[in-house]
Image (spheres, helix red, strand yellow):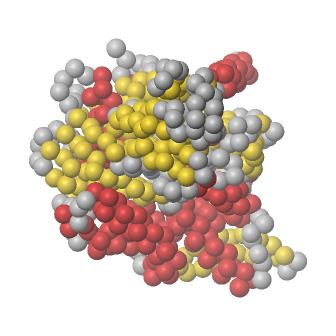
Amino acid sequence: MSRVIGIDLGTTNSCVAVLENGQPTVIPNAGGYKTTPSMFAITPDGKRLVGHLAKRQAITNSKHTIFASKRLIGRRFDAPEVQRSIDLCPYDIVRGPNDDPRIEIGGKAFTCPEIGATILREMKRVAEEYLGEPVQEAVITVPAYFNDTQRQSTKDAGKIAGLDVLRIVNEPTAAAIAYGFNKQSEERIAVFDLGGGTFDISILEMSDGVIEVLATAGDTFLGGEDFDRRIVQYLLDQFQQQESIDLRGDAMALQRLKDAAEKAKCDLSGREQVEVNLPFIASDPDGPRHLSIQLDRQTLESLVSEVVNATLKTAEQCVRDSGLEAGDVEQVILVGGQTRMPLVQQAVADFFGKRAHKGVNPDEVVAVGAAIQAESLTSEEDSVLLLDVTPLSLGIATFGGHFAQLIERNTTVPVRKGHIFTTTRENQSAVKIRVLQGESDVAAENDLLGEFVLTGIRPANKGEPEIDVSFDIDANGIVSVSARDLATGKEQSITVNATGTLSDEEIQQIIEDQELYEVALKEGVE
């Protein structure tokens, strides 16, 4: 039987792990790095690059280098987050035929699952080189606050990459699995996961090999990228004051600034002050201009304090939903590279009234947890029992534009719940079931996951027919919905494929296109 791997598909970096002799191992790539940049690029001569190779040429090829695409996956093109990305990213984001955002490079529009698949395929290749055998099965992690569409799109990415995705696991839950590995103690823990593009927090209870998620909350458009952007904005303003040159229209300069901002941010976790030095950043009739700006930790903290405070507001909601107080949490685990920042660590310590646990690597712990979960799904031995929750409420749109919740957020999955609805017009023979996910009482303010029509309802006065609508959420958080007329027995059901996800035909076409590219590449080499 082939080995099964765990993959942390991150916004900024990705990581892959496997269990060897009962112990988790994080697999290094060919360069010896245990994490790989989640970047994809196409060079001017048409060559496709992934990971470190893509990152190294980003400055000179910024328009054709894709980063942070995870922030777009499973969203609609008109979503505010996508529109913000259009304004911020150097590459072109266009509307796809499914009303989904796609990234255009050299005349070809790549879907977000397709880009995610290139990263997953690289993780698969890294694992296969290390293990010396093919890998077909994997557990892939996603932000806990991903909705159904984003989870479906991630599964699509796994399929395109040639992986059988055994389970989609929430990132904070995976971190808790890694922390609780071979531990028998009873603890209430909080996992504070601040990565490159997303933020999650989960409150969990661990006891006798059972990990139960009590509550989860998050923001799928908040992370280290927002810290970097504020630093870049500060550097742009400072340079404009000094040299009277606005660099905002210079794609290469912006990419250099982004790289410098990320490095300065990391350096300031261990130092009080750094110098951002970028020679020949611009030129004018008087000659070249160089950027040299001192940035201290206090200035950095003032720039990003708003983002850190936003994470604490989300943490308050999560603790409230769990039914606990912050002081009831016995252990705090920090996940994601951005939690290395002293300001973040202090804010979390102040909120929970205790310092965070230092025994896990924030960059690797999610992949480790995914690998442990992967092994438990394929092993016959007793292992961790995982009780996760759905992050967002689910329901349907009802008469008058209202949202009727059938399953509340933070309900343990898998779960099945139903409710009886009726008609609103005389002799109504069909009803449209619009499946929504969100927290607003107004239907239009929630995410539309999908819709279908139940026909064949017997003619009757309005309010008489009884229509049983049932929701089913599996362990991956994937939603199925059915509706049945109790009088006639007529039934209609769907596994929700929301607008923006790919059809089986589209997935197959992408797989075939990739195979054609690889064949052409080999023929070119030979």
Can residue 258 be seen at all in this image of the molecule? yes
For residue 379, which quarter of the picture?
top left
Q: Position of residue 401 (x, y in %)?
A: 60, 52
Q: Quadrant of residue 40?
A: top right
Residue 515 percent across, percent down from the top left: 66, 20
Locate the C terminus by quadrant: top right
> 252 or 228: which is nearer to us?
228
Name the residue furthest top: 1
- Residue 263 on image: x %, y %: 52, 64
Total labels drawn: 0
Identified at 29% across, 34% down, the residue is 372
> Which of these two is toward me, 318 or 437?
437
Which residue occupies 31% across, 63% down? 320
Residue 58 at x, y percent in the picture: 66, 51
Nearest the camera: 313 or 407? 407
Residue at image x 59%, y 42%?
Answer: 424
Residue at 88% across, 77% down: 285
Any part of residue 10 in sight: no
Task: In the rendered view, tell whether residue 333 sits above or below residue 504.
Answer: below
Relative to 50, residue 442 above or below: below
Above or below: residue 249 compared with residue 520: below
Q: In the image, 512: left or right of 442?
A: right
Left or right, residue 122 beside residue 500: left
Does 46 appear above or below 87? above
**305 left or right, relative to 346:** right
